[in-house]
C-alpha cells in the first residue's frame, strides 16, 4: 500500500540544550517531498543547531525524527547519509590540498581488489555536474578554485552519495551576486528532480525568490510556518524579530570636515598572479562621511585593507596619511592607538581570539592602558565592568555573559562584540569590512545605526561591502574597485544599481579626471 504521508522528514518537539542556553525549545519542522523549505531566524535563533540535530552532529534531549512516516534514530552524520540526508555547512568541510574529485568521493571511495577506481567516479561526477548545471573541473585543487566552485563541490558530494534531503546552511553568505543567482537556479533544478531541500537563511529576498514554504524560529522557539506565495518580506521579518524592521537607513546628509585618511599611489603585490592585487590606488576619507569601496569579491579590496591596517606591506612609493601623518612604516598597534578602528572581513581569523573569553576579546587593544592595568597587572574587575557595559549597550547575547568563550557564540553575536570593541575605542577613522556579512535584518539595522552614529560623532568611515543594498543605503560616496583599481566614483543619490554593476563587472570605467565614462 502507498504511503499517504506527504512529509519526507518530520522533526517533532525537538529540544536541544547547551550550557546556559536552550538552543531549540520544543521545535517542530515538516519537510514535504520535492519542496524547498526555508528555515528563517535571527543569528542565534537555533537554525543551525536544529539542522545539526537532523544531520546527527548533535543528539536532542527531547523529540523525535521521522522519515517517510517511520521513526528514525540519527546518532552521527554516517547515519544521516545512510538515510539519504546530506548537508552543506556554512564553513565548507573540504580538504584544500585535494582535488575536487577526491573531495567528492572521500569516505565513499570506489575500490576493486583494494585499489582506488577513480575513472567511473569521475564519469559519474561529470554526468551529475552536467545534469544539475554544476560546472566544476574535477581535477582542480580545492585551494585554487573560487568559493562558489567550492560550494558546488559540496553540492556534488551530496548528489554523489544519492542524498534525497539536502540541507543548505547559509549557502549565500560568501557568494557574489552572480553566484547567488546561479545557486538559486541550481536549487530550483534540484527540487524539480525530486530532491527535498532545507535552506537556512536570513536573507528575506532570497527566501521570497526560491522557497515554497518557510518555518520561522525566534530565540530557540517555533513561531510558525507560512506559504511564501501568501506572505511578504515585512511579515516574515516581523515574525523573525518580533517587531517591524526598517529596510532603509535613516541618516542626515553628510557634513564632511577635515581629511582623516589620504592614500596616495598604493599598490600591493598579488600572491596569486603576476599582476598587482592593488594597482596605484589613491583616495581620501574626511571626518563626518562614509566612503564605500564597492566591487565583486576578489578585486583587491582585501589586500587594500590589509595594506592600510598594517597586515600587508605596500609596494614602495605609497603614502598612507592618517590625520596628516605618514603611517606606512608604523606598526599595527601604533595605528590602533592613533585613531584607527578596524572591523575585519574574517571575524574568526582577524577579529577574535576564539578561545579567549568575551571580556578578554573586548579589551584586546586596550588592556595595557592605565584604565585596565596597574603596575603591569591587569585589573580584572575593571575589565569585567567595561565588558558588562558593552554587552548591555550592544545587546551581545551569550550563554555565560562576559566569561563566555568567544568560539561558542553565534556569528552575529561575535560580530556585535567586534563592533562594540572597535566603536567604543577612541578613533578618528573606522574601517569596516563586510560589517554585516552573514547577519540577520535586526542585527544589520543595529550595525548600520552604529556606523551612522560614528560618522555623526565626527569620525571618518571607510566601508568595504559586497552587498549592493548596503552600499546604496549607507554610503555618502561610492568608489568602485575592479581588478585592483578604482574605476569610478559615484553619488549614491544619483547612481543606479545597474550602473554600478557595469563598473563592478569591468564593462565601464571613468577616465582619470572622473569625467565621462566609456565602454571598455
Image (spheres, rainbow, N blue to C red):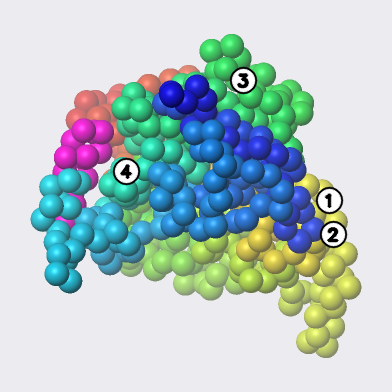
- Location of residue 458 (image quadrant): top right
CB within 8 Å, label 1 to label 2: yes
Q: Secondary structure at mark 2?
A: helix
Residue at image coords 14%, 65%: 112
Q: Quick one: label 3 or label 2, which is nearer the N terminus?
A: 3
Extreme left residue here?
A: 119
Classify 10 Å Cα crowding around label 1: few (below 14), some (14-19), many (20 and above). few
Q: Give the CA distance from mark 4 to mark 1.
A: 47 Å
Give the distance between the C-alpha atoms of the residues marked 3 and 2, in whole angstroms.
38 Å
Query: Could you say whether the residue bearing mark 3 is in a helix, strand or loop?
Result: strand
Residue 512 on the magenta span = no
Cα–Cα gap, marks 1 and 2? 6 Å
For residue 132: magenta?
yes
User: 404 or 388: nearer the eye?
Assistant: 404
Q: Is residue 173 above or below residue 237?
A: below
Residue carrying label 3: 226
Q: On the image, numbered disc 4 is attached to which residue?
A: 162
Q: Confirm whether residue 51 shows in the render.
A: yes
Quadrant hosting residue 366: bottom right
Q: CA distance from mark 3 to mark 4?
A: 29 Å
Q: Quadrant of the N terminus?
A: top left
In primary-sequence order, the first of circles 1 and 3 is 3
Dot 4: element: loop
Instruction: Read off the residue under disc 1.
Output: 392
Quadrant, the C terminus: top left
Amino acid at each position: 500500500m502507498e504511503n499517504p504521508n506527504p512529509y519526507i522528514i518530520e522533526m517533532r518537539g525537538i529540544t536541544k540544550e547547551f550550557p546556559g542556553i536552550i538552543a531549540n525549545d520544543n521545535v517542530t519542522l515538516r519537510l514535504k517531498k520535492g519542496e524547498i523549505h526555508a528555515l528563517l531566524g535571527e543569528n542565534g535563533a537555533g537554525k543551525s543547531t536544529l539542522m545539526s540535530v537532523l544531520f546527527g552532529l548533535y543528539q536532542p534531549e527531547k523529540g523525535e525524527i521521522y522519515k517517510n512516516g517511520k521513526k528514525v534514530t540519527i546518532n552521527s552524520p554516517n547515519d544521516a547519509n545512510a538515510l539519504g540526508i546530506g548537508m552543506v555547512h556554512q564553513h565548507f568541510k573540504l580538504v584544500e590540498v585535494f582535488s575536487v574529485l577526491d573531495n567528492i568521493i572521500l569516505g565513499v571511495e570506489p575500490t576493486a581488489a583494494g585499489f582506488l577506481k577513480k575513472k567511473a567516479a569521475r564519469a559519474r561526477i561529470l554526468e551529475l555536474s552536467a545534469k544539475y548545471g554544476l560546472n566544476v573541473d574535477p581535477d582542480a585543487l580545492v585551494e585554487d578554485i573560487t568559493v562558489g566552485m567550492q560550494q558546488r563541490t559540496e553540492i556534488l558530494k551530496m548528489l554523489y552519495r544519492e542524498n534525497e534531503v539536502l540541507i543548505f546552511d547559509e549557502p549565500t553568505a560568501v557568494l557574489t551576486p552572480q553566484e547567488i543567482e546561479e545557486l538559486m537556479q541550481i536549487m530550483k533544478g534540484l527540487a524539480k528532480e525530486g530532491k527535498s531541500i532545507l535552506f537556512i537563511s536570513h536573507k528575506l529576498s532570497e527566501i521570497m525568490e526560491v522557497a515554497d514554504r518557510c518555518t520561522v524560529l525566534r530565540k530557540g522557539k517555533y513561531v510558525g510556518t507560512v506559504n511564501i506565495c501568501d506572505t511578504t518580506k515585512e511579515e516574515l521579518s516581523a515574525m523573525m524579530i518580533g517587531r517591524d524592521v526598517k529596510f532603509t537607513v535613516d541618516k542626515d546628509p553628510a557634513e564632511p570636515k577635515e581629511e582623516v585618511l589620504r592614500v596616495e599611489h598604493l599598490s600591493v603585490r598579488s600572491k596569486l598572479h603576476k599582476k598587482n592585487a592593488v594597482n596605484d590606488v589613491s583616495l581620501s576619507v574626511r571626518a563626518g562621511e562614509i566612503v564605500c569601496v564597492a566591487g565583486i569579491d576578489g578585486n583587491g579590496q582585501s589586500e587594500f585593507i590589509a595594506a592600510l591596517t598594517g597586515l600587508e606591506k605596500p609596494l614602495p612609493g605609497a603614502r598612507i596619511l592618517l590625520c596628516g601623518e605618514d603611517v606606512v612604516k608604523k606598526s599595527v598597534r601604533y595605528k590602533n592607538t592613533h585613531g584607527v578602528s578596524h572591523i575585519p572581513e574574517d571575524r574568526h581569523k582577524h577579529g577574535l581570539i576564539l578561545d579567549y573569553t568575551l571580556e578578554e576579546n573586548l579589551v584586546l587593544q586596550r588592556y595595557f592602558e592605565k584604565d585596565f592595568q596597574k603596575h603591569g597587572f591587569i585589573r580584572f574587575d575593571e575589565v569585567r565592568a567595561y565588558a558588562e557595559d558593552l554587552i548591555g549597550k550592544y545587546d551581545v547575547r551569550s550563554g555565560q555573559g562576559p566569561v563566555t568563550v568567544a568560539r561558542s557564540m553565534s556569528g552575529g553575536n561575535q560580530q556585535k562584540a567586534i563592533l562594540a570593541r572597535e566603536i567604543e575605542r577612541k578613533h578618528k577613522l573606522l574601517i569596516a569590512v563586510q560589517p554585516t556579512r552573514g547577519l540577520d535584518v535586526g542585527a544589520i539595522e543595529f550595525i548600520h545605526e552604529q556606523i551612522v552614529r560614528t560618522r555623526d560623532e565626527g569620525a571618518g568611515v571607510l566601508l568595504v561591502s559586497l552587498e549592493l543594498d548596503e552600499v546604496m543605503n549607507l554610503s555618502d560616496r561610492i568608489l568602485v574597485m575592479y581588478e585592483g583599481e578604482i574605476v569610478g566614483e559615484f553619488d549614491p543619490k544619483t547612481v543606479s544599481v545597474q550602473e554600478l554593476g557595469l563598473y563592478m563587472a569591468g564593462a565601464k570605467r571613468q577616465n582619470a579626471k572622473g569625467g565621462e565614462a566609456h565602454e571598455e
